[in-house]
Amino acid sequence: MALPEPPRPRVPARQFGDLQLDIYLDGLEGRIPKYPVDFASLERKAAETLPWWVHSYVAGGCGDEYTQRLNVSAFQKYGIVPRMLNGAYERDLSVELMGIDLQTPLLMSPVGVIGLCAQDFHGDLHVAEAAARTGVPMIASTLTMDPMEAVAARFGETPGFFQLYTPRDRDLAASLVHRAEQAGFRAIVVTLDTWTPGWRPRDLNAASFPQLRGYCLENYFTDETFLRRLAASPREDRDAAAREWMRIWGQSLRWDDLDWLRSLTELPIALKGICHPDDARRALDHGMDAIYCSNHGGRQANGGLAAIDLLPDVVAAAGDMPVIFDSGVRSGSDLAKALAMGATAVGVGRPYAYALAVGGTDGVVHQLGAILAELDLLMAIDGYPSIEALRRAGVRRA
Ligand SMILES: Cc1cc2nc3c(=O)[nH]c(=O)nc-3n(C[C@H](O)[C@H](O)[C@H](O)COP(=O)(O)O)c2cc1C
């Protein structure tokens, strides 16, 4: 008689926190990690590695960058309260987002110049490979150095999301969404706060805007709908193509436009840039599938509050709708706090951009692993065996 199947393990045999022991054991053999595990060291190394104009674009924010700094420092006001004797020997970091099962709650936020952060300027492809290796989804920007089809082809088993900058030309918007569907992306993230660039002194003082030089526009330059607008192909006249892109790239959407966007696709849609509870409620009324609470890492409007301070009200208004969060997350403990404050999944922007600059695909895999190891060990030590347990416990204000 056949023996019954052994029960499926509830959590993977290997825990994310095991990276710590790997590193110490390597140290016994005289090997130290090739890339830093912390954000501050990574930021310093990336500043030495990136071309100045790419570094300016990535590191810079709006105005005097007050909101950008506040996004990060505001996390210090909140803390997770440890619980003991709670059986967190094994942790389950998996979550469900918009009907998609994810191994962890970590996401790579869309970064429009990620292509340029790699030394070969194919950063989008390297990040997609890192997504395949880690199970951490990439939210691919509309602004890429390689077309979305080539990016999606490297996701492996990891789901990928497509971020849409809705162009003024509705046919082009429809074409981009349909291409994303065809390419196998699992959801569309519509960014609402960037129909025009914010006021960024670092780039303004150097008169540098990479897209106007023709970088990161491959999704447009491979789109028949966009190409029909041009007198000459981008290969013949890149300047004219980039100027045409500038004319049409950003539409200031209104609530009614959401019904049109909804009609374009069956894929789940998340709205990125929602920071007010009333806007979250209206998104629900318009049939959206997720809220993405973010202030664009402080790059778009300065003088605003830290995004993390706005998250709890947005979560309360979103009801059963999942809430993605980003802006200012620099470590596993920041990630834990955002989850405990109600986020379903949490994105990082600059941390993986700098990791790519410093170490290519391996660098991104290492940095994502480091963030997840810190989250996992925090959950282990503070007594939270699952993301749901963390969420139920919430945070305490210092
Ligand atoms: C260099 C750079 C480019 C970005 N490009 C995009 C983009 O193309 N689309 C988008 O929705 N958000 C974009 N963002 C915003 C990120 O998705 C995210 O909201 C932000 O980086 C989170 O803040 P953090 O960098 O503090 O983690 C960009 C951010 C950076 C730093």
Image (cartoon, rainbow, N blue to C red):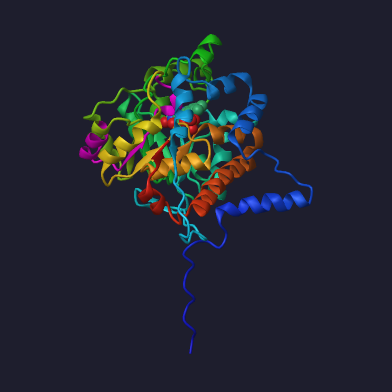
Number of marks in picture: 0
Q: Where is residue 335 in the image (x, y as percent from the top left)?
A: 47, 41
**222 or 372, nearer to the observer:** 372
For image coordinates 52% across by 51% down, the residue present is 376
Magenta segment: 279-301
Quadrant location of the C terminus in the rendered image:
top left
27 to 262, vertically: above or below: below
Residue 129 shows up from this direction: no
Check residue 94 for magenta coloring: no
Q: Where is residue 246 in the image (x, y as percent from the top left)?
A: 42, 18
Q: Quadrant of residue 197?
A: top left
Q: Where is residue 103 in the image (x, y as percent from the top left)?
A: 47, 53
Drawn side of residue 16 relative to residue 393, left or right: right
Drawn side of residue 117 relative to residue 182, left or right: right
Q: Where is residue 220 in the image (x, y as percent from the top left)?
A: 44, 28
Check residue 293 for magenta coloring: yes
> Which residue reaches farthest right?
30
> Which residue reaches farthest bottom?
1
**382 or 247, nearer to the observer:** 382
85 to 332, vertically: above or below: below
277 to 181, vertically: above or below: above
Residue 361 shows up from this direction: yes
For image coordinates 39% across by 20% down, the residue present is 301
**353 or 219, nearer to the observer:** 353
For image coordinates 44% across by 24% down, the residue present is 298
